[in-house]
Amino acid sequence: MIYSDIALSAVFVAVVLDLFLLKSRMMTRGIFWLTYFLILPFQLLTNWWLTSNKIVMYSDTEIIGQRLAGAPIEDLLFGFSMILLTISAWEFFKRRLNEL
């Protein structure tokens, strides 16, 4: 499995968890998208720093080939899935604690 497959799978899993299992439905809320676009520049900055300092290196045979801020485009997908899953889980557990 190449990095592209992993990134796409991560997005699929995060969306399914958000919409159907955790039922946080963060993707349907404007505040999620505002939060995501506030975090995105920092993700790009971190990607650039890690790749330009050779802390993280990607094999060209394992990615689509397009890069943004030095990192593969797939990093945006993977980052999106991590942000979505974190916020969805936060909302889910907050809701569960309020029910106690």
Image (cartoon, helix red, strand yellow):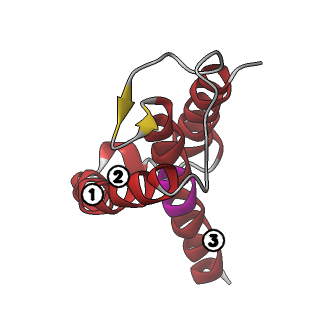
Q: Nearer the viewer, mark 3 or mark 2?
A: 2
Q: Does the magenta stretch include residue 86?
A: yes
Q: Residue at x 45, y 52 (%)?
A: 52
Expressed as whole percent of the image width and height from the top left, the position of residue 2 reads 70, 20
Expressed as whole percent of the image width and height from the top left, the position of residue 6 reads 67, 28
Q: On the rendered image, what quadrant is the C terminus found in?
A: bottom right
Majority secondary structure of magenta residues: helix
The magenta stretch spans which residues? Answer: 83-87
Tell which circle, 1 or 3, labels the residue nearer the N-terminal end.
1
Expressed as whole percent of the image width and height from the top left, the position of residue 69 reads 33, 44
Amino acid type of the residue that numbered disc 1 sits on in the rendered structure: Pro
Q: How many labels does the image show?
A: 3
Amino acid type of the residue that numbered disc 2 sits on in the rendered structure: Leu
Measured in 3D between alpha carbons, the distance from the residue under mark 1 to the one under mark 2, in whole angstroms, is 5 Å
Q: Residue at x 42, y 30 (%)?
A: 73
- Residue farthest toward the front in the current orientation of the protein: 53
Q: Do the residues labelled 1 and 2 touch (CB within 8 Å)?
A: yes
Up-down relation of residue 28 to residue 36 (above or below): above
Residue 93 image label: 3
Residue highlighted by disc 2: 44
Q: Nearer the viewer, residue 49 or 81?
A: 49
**Residue 25 vs residue 95: left or right?**
left
Q: Is residue 7 magenta?
A: no
Q: Tag 3, which secondary structure?
A: helix
Residue highlighted by disc 1: 41
Q: Residue at x 48, y 51 (%)?
A: 84
Expressed as whole percent of the image width and height from the top left, the position of residue 53 reads 50, 58
Q: How crowded is mark 1: few (under 14 residues within 10 Å), some or many (20 or more)?
A: few
**Residue 66 vs residue 86: left or right?**
left
Q: Which residue is drawn at 24% across and 62% down?
A: 38
